[in-house]
Image: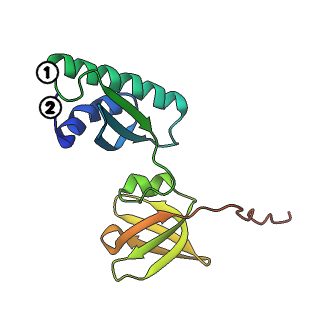
Amino acid sequence: MTASVPELTDRLRPVVEAAGCDLESLSVKAAGRRTVVRVLVDKDGGVTLDDVASVSRALGDALDAADDAAPGPLAAAYVLEVSSPGVDRPLTEPRHWRRNAGRLVTVTRRDGTPLTGRVVAADDAGITLEVDGAEHTLAYPDVLSGAVQVEFSRAAPAVEDA
């Protein structure tokens, strides 16, 4: 199979989606005599180990079938790695923001100023952050970058007496 990364992505995206996940990224790198195909998948509610195993089997079958049809650089010597994106993945798509509702994030606005707050909501138009008790709504064109902040101990919400 002599497909470029964009062609391979187009070919494998339906396989990942049929397994109920989104294809976040795909890379192909030479590693000695082998080729390493790395695939990151995600879905609403998070990816389980069963999801990764299912996607891995389906992608392996698809890669093998494509290579049988047109042998190329992957041949039989490829390693397939399927995983989910880590917490350090940049938030670039509306679904990334939606999947991180409730999480603390830092946003760099288009003007270069940072804003750190908790994701309250996200839709196709933008995100709403809670910053020091006030809500700030940002349209995606106003956001240069976004990243989840790791919290080692989040304070529990206050419980009101009845």
Query: In the picture provided, is 94 more to the left or to the right than 129?
Result: left
For residue 70, which numbered disc appears in the image? Answer: 1
Q: Is residue 103 or residue 78 the one in the foreground?
A: 78
Q: Earlier in the sequence, mark 2 or mark 1?
A: 2
Q: Is residue 51 or residue 156 the one in the foreground?
A: 51
Query: Which amino acid lies under the numbered mark 2 shown in the image of this protein?
Result: Thr
Q: Residue at x 30, y 25 (%)?
A: 77
How many other residues sit within 10 Å of disc 2, few (<14), some (14-19) or many (≥20)? some
Instruction: Look at the image and name its color scheme.
Output: rainbow
The residue that label 2 is drawn on is 2
Q: Residue at x 40, y 58 (%)?
A: 123
User: x%, y% of residue 146?
Assistant: 43, 66
The quadrant holding residue 160 is bottom right
User: x%, y% of residue 153?
Assistant: 72, 62
User: x%, y% of residue 48?
Assistant: 54, 34
For residue 100, which numbered disc appears in the image? Answer: none
Q: Determine contact: label 2, label 1, CB under 8 Å.
A: yes
Q: Secondary structure at mark 1?
A: loop
The quadrant holding residue 142 is bottom left
